Image (tube, helix red, strand yellow):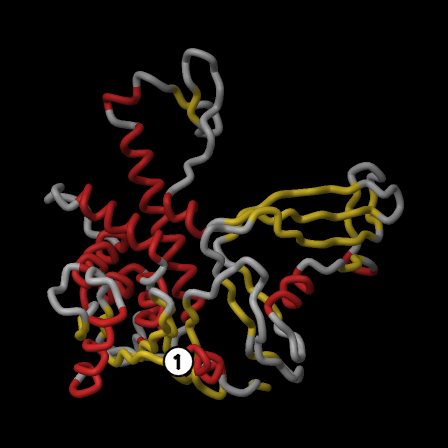
Amino acid sequence: MGAAGSKLEKALGEQFPEGERYFGLENFGNTCYCNSVLQALYFCVPFREQLLEYYASNKSAGDAEDNLLTCLADLFSQISSQKKKTGVIAPKRFVQRVKKQNELFRSYMHQDAHEFLNFLLNELVDILEKESKASKASPETSSSSEKTANGARTSPANGVKEEPLVTWVHKNFQGILTNETRCLRCETVTAREETFLDLSLDIEQNSSITSCLKNFSSTETLNAEDKFFCDKCCSLQEAQKRMKIKKLPHILVIHLKRFKYIEQLGVQEALLPGLLLSAVVVHVGSGPNHGHYVSLVKSHSHWLFFDDENVEMIDESAVQTFFGPPRVL
């Protein structure tokens, strides 16, 4: 990192806690989408701490299966245990596992950071759920509970179904939406809850995050070929539909749809009251099929810019400049 690295290390020594590490990640040809997401996740402190806790409790198992979770935990452990505060690490083992797991990321074409984040979080959840099921199926636990027909477990003492498994990934990133549909004939409201790990928001002209979220929850009319089948009316009826956020997650991931056909897009101005911006993954380029990803991370009241191997401190006033001008397709 040269002179810039020395300057950064001096600043880090003066303004940051001793235990923090700020390492660039080597790019293997087209892996900026991966590196930028990894940096954002590393500086989600609750997620990092729980992942390292998982690593510490599982590293003693020498015959443990090598999967995306163990590779990610090993990478975060490598970074956090470095003697120096700055430097560069090659996430080779993790990237190889990603490509082995999902053929979408095997080519050298431009990849989508949002798709990668979704794949990674869902894969981590699947691994943790499988490990939990395997643990419950062990001889020590199989005698204390029985499976119902739908796969849920019950306690033989009272026959009460166990709640669905909530992993530490869920506890960090999972929120709850309520999908409401109101029949315009009988006024019956049908509500269905669903979980989410991130929200994809349309960007309106000169809008803020707050207004984008309000637009996300706006009412939509279902008519013509899109009529709603009302169970009470027993027929297709015109209806009003809206999606409400019932419960925000501890760490809210927002995907801003910056690329749109025809429509002019606006730059974001503000966050929801009460929410603190901690990391941004930014696509730099004129179209969705090519360009470069970087990440901006807030750590201990300071902003840092991560561009693969390069790490720099930046002023908070400069953060918005990385969003770039509006893009129209």
Q: Who's the residue at 56% across and 73% down the image?
A: 257
Viewer-proximal residue among 172 and 100: 172
In the image, residue 255 lies at what x, y percent?
51, 67
In what element is the residue under mark 1? loop
In the rendered structure, the answer to whether residue 150 lies left or right of residue 44 reads right
Residue appearing at x 22%, y 52% in the figure: 70
Where on the picture, by quarter, is residue 22?
bottom left
Report if residue 273 is visible in the image: yes
Against 206, is 200 above or below?
Answer: above
Q: Badge 1 is on which residue?
A: 315
- Density class for disc 1 (Cα within 10 Å; few <14, some 14-19, many ≥20) is few
Task: From the top left corner, tell me how far across and down residue 246 is, in percent.
Answer: 61, 47
Residue that appears at 63% across and 62% down: 213
Residue at the far top in the pictured view: 157
Nearest the viewer among 55 and 129 is 55
| Residue 133 falls left or right of residue 220 | left
Task: Tell me if residue 185 comes above or below residue 269 in the rendering.
Answer: above
Kind of residue indicated by mark 1: Asp
Q: Position of residue 276 (x, y in %)?
A: 48, 62
- Whether residue 108 sits left or right of residue 56 in the image: it is right
- Can residue 28 be seen here? The reply is no
Residue in the picture at 83% in, 44% down: 235
Choose top left, top right, bottom left or bottom right for residue 36.
Answer: bottom left
Q: How many numbered circles are shown?
A: 1
Which quadrant, please, contains the C terminus?
bottom right
Q: Position of residue 302 (x, y in %)?
A: 36, 71
Viewer-closest of 113 and 307? 307
In which quadrant will I find the N terminus? bottom left
Q: Is residue 164 above or below residue 84?
A: above
Q: Residue furthest front?
A: 14
